[in-house]
Image (cartoon, grey):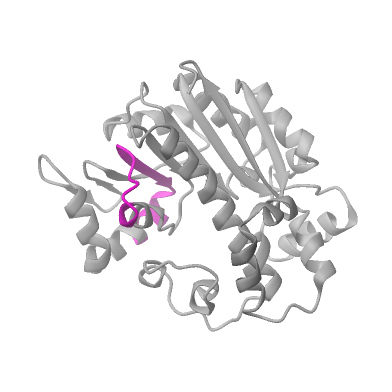
Amino acid sequence: RFAVSVGYWKDPYIQYFVRQAKERKAPEINRGKGYYARVHGVSYLIKAFLKKTECNCQIVNLGAGMDTLFWRLKDENLLPRKYFEVDFPMIVARKIHNIKSKPPLSKPIMESHSGDSLLIDSHSLDSSRYSIVGADLRFSSDLEEKLKKHDLDIHLPTLLVAECVLVYMTPQQSANLLKWAASTFPVAMFINYEQVNMTDRFGQIMIENLQRRQCNLAGVEVCRSLDSQRERLLLNGWETARAIDMMKVYSFLPQADVKRIEGLEFLDEKELFEQLMQHYCICWASKDSSNL
C-alpha cells in the first residue's frame, strides 16, 4: 500500500484491505524485489496468458492473501472465465469480511456474477466468476476437492500463480503441489515468484534476519540457484521451465516507466538494490497438450 501511495503503480483496491502503514518501506524494496518489478513482471506473464487464451481460461492464485488482482483484471476487461484464490481459512475469513463490508469490493463481484444466488460463508466465497477457498496447500487432495466444489474445470487452460508461497513449505510438500498441478490440467502454466541464490553470503544474511523474526523458510534449499528453481518444475511434470532474476526483469520493463519511478524516491544504495534483485526471481513453466 505504501508503494501505491507513493505512485509506483495504480491499485485503487489495496486501501480496502490494508490499513495505512505507519512505516515507510525502503526505496529498494518499493522499487525492486517486493513491489514494482514483481507486480509488473508477474502481471506481464498473467496478461500474456489471458491474451493467448482469449480469457477462455481460469486462474488459481495460491496463497493469495489480500491480493487485488481480480478487481484490477475486471477493470481492464480481462477477467478469465473463473478466478480462484486459495489461502489459510483464517486469512480467507479476514478477506471475506473486508469484501462484505466494503461496497467498492463487493459491487464488482455482484456485477460479474450470473445465475443463482451468491454463496458466502465465513471461510469461502463463491460467485460465478470469483471464488475464495480456505485450504492448506500442503494437502493437494483437500485442495482439489474444495476447488471442484467451486466449479474448477480441469479441461480449461489454467494459470496457477504462487508469489512467495512455496518457500514456506518443505521441498517435498511444494513438489507434491507442483506435481498435482502438472498432472491435473492438460493445458497449464505455473508462475512462481521467490527467493534465489540463497547460498551466498547475502542470502545467508536474509535467512538469518527472517529467522530472528521467527520466520522459517522451510523450502529454502530449492532456492539455491536459477537452475535449481527450473529443475524443480521440470522434475515435477512440467514440460518447459524458465527462471530469471529480478535484475533481469527490471531491465525488461518499459524503460520510460522505469525512469518515472526512479524519480519517485532517492535511492542511495544502488549496490544493495542490485544485490536484493539478484536474490529474487520469477519462474514460469508450462504444460501444453493443445499447442497454445
Which quadrant of the structure image shows residue 173?
top right
Frontmost residue, 202 versus 121: 202
For this view, does 126 lie left or right of residue 274?
left
For this view, does 41 lie left or right of residue 276?
left
For this view, does 70 lie left or right of residue 189?
left
Which quadrant of the structure image shows residue 203?
bottom right
As drawn, the residue found furthest toward the front would be 256
Which contiguous range is marked in magenta?
Answer: 74-94
Q: Is residue 107 above or below residue 22?
A: above
Q: In the rendering, at what x and y percent does residue 101 appear?
A: 23, 68
As drawn, the residue found furthest toward the bottom would be 22
Q: Is residue 257 above or below residue 186?
A: below
Q: In the rendering, at what x and y percent does residue 274 appear?
A: 80, 62
Q: Is residue 132 above or below residue 19?
A: above
Q: Residue at x 36, y 52 (%)?
A: 73
Q: Residue at x 65, y 78 (%)?
A: 263
As drawn, the residue found furthest toward the right would be 201
